[in-house]
Image: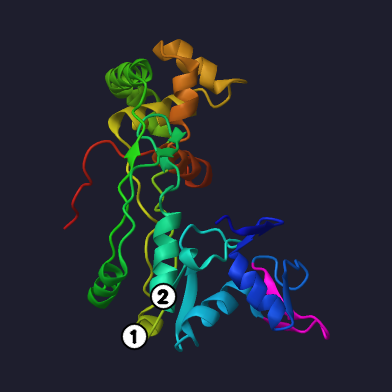
Amino acid sequence: MKPFTYEGMKVDWRMVQQIMAHGFYFLLAPEHDPDYPWVFEQETHKPICPLHVFVWMQHHGPINQGHVIHHRDHDKLNAQISNLEVLHRRVHAERHRLERQKFSPREREDYGGLYRPHAPGPVREPSFTELVRLLKRGKLTRPSSSSSPRPPEEEGEFREAEKKLKMALPRLAEEVDHLDSGQPIPRVNTQRRGSDIKLGLGKRAERRGCTPAEAALVRALVKHRMHAQPNEAVAVELEIPVGVVAKMKKRPSVDLALSRWRDYRRLPRIGPREKTE
Protein backbone atom coordinates (compact mmCIF):
# COMPACT_ATOMS: atom_id res chain seq x y z
CA MET A 1 0.00 0.00 0.00
CA LYS A 2 1.29 3.43 -0.90
CA PRO A 3 1.95 5.74 2.06
CA PHE A 4 0.04 8.90 2.78
CA THR A 5 1.97 11.75 1.13
CA TYR A 6 1.43 15.43 1.80
CA GLU A 7 3.89 18.32 1.30
CA GLY A 8 6.75 15.84 1.06
CA MET A 9 5.79 14.00 4.27
CA LYS A 10 5.29 10.24 4.07
CA VAL A 11 3.32 8.31 6.71
CA ASP A 12 1.60 4.94 6.73
CA TRP A 13 -2.19 5.21 6.29
CA ARG A 14 -2.84 3.20 9.46
CA MET A 15 -0.69 5.61 11.46
CA VAL A 16 -2.60 8.57 10.01
CA GLN A 17 -5.83 7.02 11.28
CA GLN A 18 -4.32 6.50 14.76
CA ILE A 19 -3.12 10.10 14.91
CA MET A 20 -6.56 11.41 14.00
CA ALA A 21 -8.25 9.00 16.44
CA HIS A 22 -6.17 10.38 19.33
CA GLY A 23 -7.29 13.91 18.52
CA PHE A 24 -3.97 14.95 17.00
CA TYR A 25 -2.75 16.17 13.64
CA PHE A 26 0.73 16.47 12.14
CA LEU A 27 2.16 19.40 10.27
CA LEU A 28 5.47 20.71 8.98
CA ALA A 29 5.74 24.07 10.75
CA PRO A 30 9.02 25.82 9.82
CA GLU A 31 8.53 28.45 12.51
CA HIS A 32 8.42 25.66 15.13
CA ASP A 33 10.93 23.17 13.68
CA PRO A 34 12.41 23.71 10.20
CA ASP A 35 13.61 20.09 9.89
CA TYR A 36 10.98 17.68 11.20
CA PRO A 37 7.17 17.57 11.04
CA TRP A 38 5.50 17.59 14.46
CA VAL A 39 2.32 16.20 15.99
CA PHE A 40 -0.07 18.80 17.49
CA GLU A 41 -3.29 18.65 19.50
CA GLN A 42 -6.35 19.54 17.45
CA GLU A 43 -8.05 21.65 20.13
CA THR A 44 -5.17 23.54 21.74
CA HIS A 45 -2.65 23.25 18.86
CA LYS A 46 -0.06 22.32 21.47
CA PRO A 47 3.02 20.55 20.06
CA ILE A 48 3.38 16.98 21.31
CA CYS A 49 6.54 15.51 19.74
CA PRO A 50 8.17 15.03 16.32
CA LEU A 51 6.21 12.86 13.94
CA HIS A 52 8.87 10.15 13.58
CA VAL A 53 9.14 9.86 17.37
CA PHE A 54 5.35 9.51 17.68
CA VAL A 55 5.29 6.81 14.99
CA TRP A 56 8.06 4.82 16.67
CA MET A 57 6.47 5.03 20.11
CA GLN A 58 3.13 3.84 18.74
CA HIS A 59 4.81 0.69 17.41
CA HIS A 60 7.55 -0.03 19.97
CA GLY A 61 6.75 1.97 23.08
CA PRO A 62 8.94 4.51 24.91
CA ILE A 63 12.47 5.23 23.72
CA ASN A 64 15.31 4.34 26.08
CA GLN A 65 17.37 7.16 27.50
CA GLY A 66 20.33 8.15 25.33
CA HIS A 67 18.76 6.79 22.13
CA VAL A 68 17.31 8.61 19.12
CA ILE A 69 15.28 7.68 16.06
CA HIS A 70 17.24 7.51 12.81
CA HIS A 71 15.85 7.83 9.27
CA ARG A 72 17.34 5.06 7.16
CA ASP A 73 17.10 6.97 3.87
CA HIS A 74 18.15 10.28 5.54
CA ASP A 75 14.82 11.84 4.52
CA LYS A 76 13.54 13.70 7.57
CA LEU A 77 10.03 13.86 6.12
CA ASN A 78 9.72 10.09 5.62
CA ALA A 79 8.12 8.86 8.86
CA GLN A 80 7.15 5.37 7.70
CA ILE A 81 7.93 2.74 10.31
CA SER A 82 10.01 0.78 7.79
CA ASN A 83 12.27 3.83 7.43
CA LEU A 84 12.91 4.28 11.16
CA GLU A 85 15.34 2.63 13.56
CA VAL A 86 16.53 3.40 17.08
CA LEU A 87 20.23 4.15 17.64
CA HIS A 88 22.38 5.35 20.48
CA ARG A 89 23.22 9.05 20.25
CA ARG A 90 26.93 8.40 19.74
CA VAL A 91 26.32 5.78 17.07
CA HIS A 92 23.80 8.07 15.38
CA ALA A 93 26.28 10.95 15.29
CA GLU A 94 29.07 8.75 13.91
CA ARG A 95 26.81 7.32 11.21
CA HIS A 96 25.91 10.80 10.00
CA ARG A 97 29.57 11.84 10.15
CA LEU A 98 30.57 8.91 7.97
CA GLU A 99 27.76 9.76 5.59
CA ARG A 100 29.08 13.30 5.24
CA GLN A 101 32.56 11.96 4.48
CA LYS A 102 31.42 10.38 1.24
CA PHE A 103 32.38 13.66 -0.42
CA SER A 104 35.76 14.61 1.02
CA PRO A 105 37.05 18.21 0.75
CA ARG A 106 39.06 19.32 -2.22
CA GLU A 107 42.70 18.34 -1.96
CA ARG A 108 45.68 20.22 -3.27
CA GLU A 109 47.50 18.94 -6.34
CA ASP A 110 51.29 18.80 -6.26
CA TYR A 111 51.80 20.74 -9.45
CA GLY A 112 50.88 24.39 -9.64
CA GLY A 113 48.68 24.61 -6.57
CA LEU A 114 45.67 23.32 -8.48
CA TYR A 115 42.61 22.20 -6.57
CA ARG A 116 40.50 19.34 -7.86
CA PRO A 117 37.52 17.74 -6.11
CA HIS A 118 37.63 14.11 -5.07
CA ALA A 119 35.56 11.69 -7.07
CA PRO A 120 33.16 10.06 -4.57
CA GLY A 121 34.16 6.47 -4.07
CA PRO A 122 32.07 3.50 -2.95
CA VAL A 123 31.26 3.71 0.75
CA ARG A 124 29.97 0.84 2.84
CA GLU A 125 27.74 1.94 5.68
CA PRO A 126 28.85 0.10 8.85
CA SER A 127 26.36 -1.89 10.86
CA PHE A 128 25.27 -1.05 14.39
CA THR A 129 27.47 -3.77 15.92
CA GLU A 130 30.50 -2.66 13.93
CA LEU A 131 30.05 0.96 14.95
CA VAL A 132 29.81 0.03 18.62
CA ARG A 133 32.96 -2.09 18.37
CA LEU A 134 34.86 0.69 16.62
CA LEU A 135 33.72 3.24 19.17
CA LYS A 136 34.98 1.06 22.02
CA ARG A 137 38.35 0.65 20.34
CA GLY A 138 38.59 4.33 19.49
CA LYS A 139 38.89 3.55 15.79
CA LEU A 140 36.52 4.32 12.95
CA THR A 141 36.53 3.18 9.36
CA ARG A 142 36.90 5.94 6.80
CA PRO A 143 35.46 5.79 3.29
CA SER A 144 37.93 5.36 0.48
CA SER A 145 38.00 7.90 -2.31
CA SER A 146 40.10 8.21 -5.42
CA SER A 147 41.34 11.59 -6.61
CA SER A 148 41.07 12.52 -10.24
CA PRO A 149 44.36 12.12 -12.14
CA ARG A 150 46.27 15.15 -13.40
CA PRO A 151 46.17 15.85 -17.13
CA PRO A 152 49.33 14.36 -18.70
CA GLU A 153 50.04 17.42 -20.83
CA GLU A 154 49.79 19.72 -17.80
CA GLU A 155 52.08 17.53 -15.73
CA GLY A 156 54.58 17.52 -18.59
CA GLU A 157 54.59 21.32 -18.72
CA PHE A 158 55.38 21.59 -15.01
CA ARG A 159 58.13 18.99 -15.16
CA GLU A 160 59.75 20.74 -18.11
CA ALA A 161 59.48 24.10 -16.34
CA GLU A 162 61.01 22.69 -13.14
CA LYS A 163 63.88 21.23 -15.15
CA LYS A 164 64.64 24.64 -16.68
CA LEU A 165 64.38 26.33 -13.29
CA LYS A 166 66.87 23.89 -11.75
CA MET A 167 69.34 24.55 -14.56
CA ALA A 168 68.98 28.32 -14.09
CA LEU A 169 69.36 28.20 -10.29
CA PRO A 170 73.18 28.72 -10.12
CA ARG A 171 73.01 31.72 -12.45
CA LEU A 172 70.09 33.28 -10.59
CA ALA A 173 71.84 32.72 -7.27
CA GLU A 174 74.90 34.65 -8.46
CA GLU A 175 72.72 37.54 -9.63
CA VAL A 176 70.35 37.82 -6.67
CA ASP A 177 71.87 36.28 -3.53
CA HIS A 178 73.79 39.46 -2.66
CA LEU A 179 70.40 41.06 -1.88
CA ASP A 180 69.79 38.63 1.00
CA SER A 181 69.86 40.59 4.26
CA GLY A 182 70.91 37.62 6.39
CA GLN A 183 68.87 38.81 9.36
CA PRO A 184 67.24 36.08 11.47
CA ILE A 185 63.53 35.50 11.15
CA PRO A 186 61.81 36.39 14.45
CA ARG A 187 60.36 33.63 16.55
CA VAL A 188 56.61 33.24 16.86
CA ASN A 189 55.54 32.96 20.50
CA THR A 190 53.07 30.22 21.33
CA GLN A 191 50.88 29.71 24.39
CA ARG A 192 53.20 29.27 27.36
CA ARG A 193 52.66 26.99 30.31
CA GLY A 194 54.53 26.15 33.49
CA SER A 195 58.29 26.66 33.30
CA ASP A 196 58.02 28.06 29.75
CA ILE A 197 56.70 31.30 31.25
CA LYS A 198 60.01 31.92 33.02
CA LEU A 199 62.22 30.75 30.19
CA GLY A 200 60.28 32.66 27.54
CA LEU A 201 60.54 29.83 25.06
CA GLY A 202 59.07 30.28 21.62
CA LYS A 203 58.55 28.35 18.47
CA ARG A 204 59.71 29.13 14.97
CA ALA A 205 57.17 29.64 12.25
CA GLU A 206 56.17 26.56 10.31
CA ARG A 207 58.91 25.72 7.81
CA ARG A 208 57.96 24.87 4.26
CA GLY A 209 61.23 24.41 2.45
CA CYS A 210 61.46 25.20 -1.25
CA THR A 211 62.62 22.71 -3.83
CA PRO A 212 65.50 23.81 -6.08
CA ALA A 213 63.02 24.73 -8.82
CA GLU A 214 60.92 26.78 -6.39
CA ALA A 215 64.03 28.50 -5.01
CA ALA A 216 65.00 29.45 -8.56
CA LEU A 217 61.50 30.78 -9.23
CA VAL A 218 61.62 32.96 -6.11
CA ARG A 219 64.98 34.39 -7.16
CA ALA A 220 63.71 35.06 -10.68
CA LEU A 221 60.68 36.89 -9.30
CA VAL A 222 62.92 38.94 -7.00
CA LYS A 223 65.16 39.77 -9.95
CA HIS A 224 62.20 41.10 -11.95
CA ARG A 225 60.39 42.64 -8.96
CA MET A 226 60.55 46.13 -10.50
CA HIS A 227 58.99 44.94 -13.75
CA ALA A 228 55.37 45.92 -14.41
CA GLN A 229 54.49 42.28 -15.10
CA PRO A 230 57.04 40.08 -13.31
CA ASN A 231 55.35 36.82 -14.30
CA GLU A 232 55.72 37.60 -17.99
CA ALA A 233 59.32 38.72 -17.52
CA VAL A 234 60.24 35.47 -15.74
CA ALA A 235 58.46 33.43 -18.40
CA VAL A 236 60.35 35.18 -21.20
CA GLU A 237 63.74 34.83 -19.51
CA LEU A 238 63.38 31.15 -18.61
CA GLU A 239 61.27 30.21 -21.66
CA ILE A 240 58.43 28.66 -19.68
CA PRO A 241 54.66 29.28 -19.98
CA VAL A 242 53.24 32.23 -18.07
CA GLY A 243 50.45 30.05 -16.70
CA VAL A 244 52.98 27.71 -15.11
CA VAL A 245 54.68 30.64 -13.38
CA ALA A 246 51.36 31.95 -12.05
CA LYS A 247 50.32 28.54 -10.73
CA MET A 248 53.68 27.80 -9.13
CA LYS A 249 53.45 31.11 -7.26
CA LYS A 250 50.34 29.73 -5.52
CA ARG A 251 52.28 26.91 -3.88
CA PRO A 252 52.49 27.39 -0.09
CA SER A 253 56.29 27.08 -0.08
CA VAL A 254 56.71 29.75 -2.78
CA ASP A 255 54.14 32.03 -1.18
CA LEU A 256 55.90 31.73 2.19
CA ALA A 257 59.31 32.42 0.61
CA LEU A 258 57.99 35.54 -1.13
CA SER A 259 56.41 36.80 2.10
CA ARG A 260 59.74 36.32 3.91
CA TRP A 261 61.44 38.31 1.16
CA ARG A 262 58.94 41.15 1.52
CA ASP A 263 59.16 41.22 5.32
CA TYR A 264 62.79 40.31 6.08
CA ARG A 265 64.60 40.41 2.71
CA ARG A 266 65.45 36.72 3.05
CA LEU A 267 65.80 34.28 0.16
CA PRO A 268 65.14 30.54 0.35
CA ARG A 269 68.15 28.43 1.26
CA ILE A 270 69.88 26.30 -1.36
CA GLY A 271 71.00 22.92 -0.10
CA PRO A 272 70.88 21.50 3.45
CA ARG A 273 71.07 23.63 6.58
CA GLU A 274 74.59 24.27 7.84
CA LYS A 275 75.26 22.84 11.29
CA THR A 276 76.71 25.24 13.83
CA GLU A 277 78.93 24.09 16.66
Q: For residue 94, which quarter of the picture?
A: bottom left
Name the side, left or right, on which 151 lies relative to 100: left
| Residue 165: in magenta span | no
Q: Which residues are magenta?
A: 36-48
Name the side, left or right, on which 47 lies relative to 194: right
Q: For residue 182, which quarter of the picture?
A: top left
Residue sitting at x 36%, y 16%? 157
Residue sitting at x 67%, y 55%? 8
Q: Which residue is mark 2?
A: 87
**Quick check: can you spot residue 71?**
no
Nearer-the-camera pick, 129 or 214: 129
Name the side, left or right, on which 242 lies relative to 47: left
In the image, residue 276 lies at what x, y percent? 19, 54
Residue sitting at x 54%, y 81%? 58
Q: Which residue is mark 1?
A: 195
Q: Amino acid at mark 2?
A: Leu
How many residues crowd around disc 2 within 10 Å: few (fewer than 14), some, or many (20 or more)? Answer: some
| Residue 39: in magenta span | yes
Q: Amino acid at mark 1?
A: Ser
The tag on residue 113 is none
In the image, residue 71 lies at what x, y percent? 50, 65
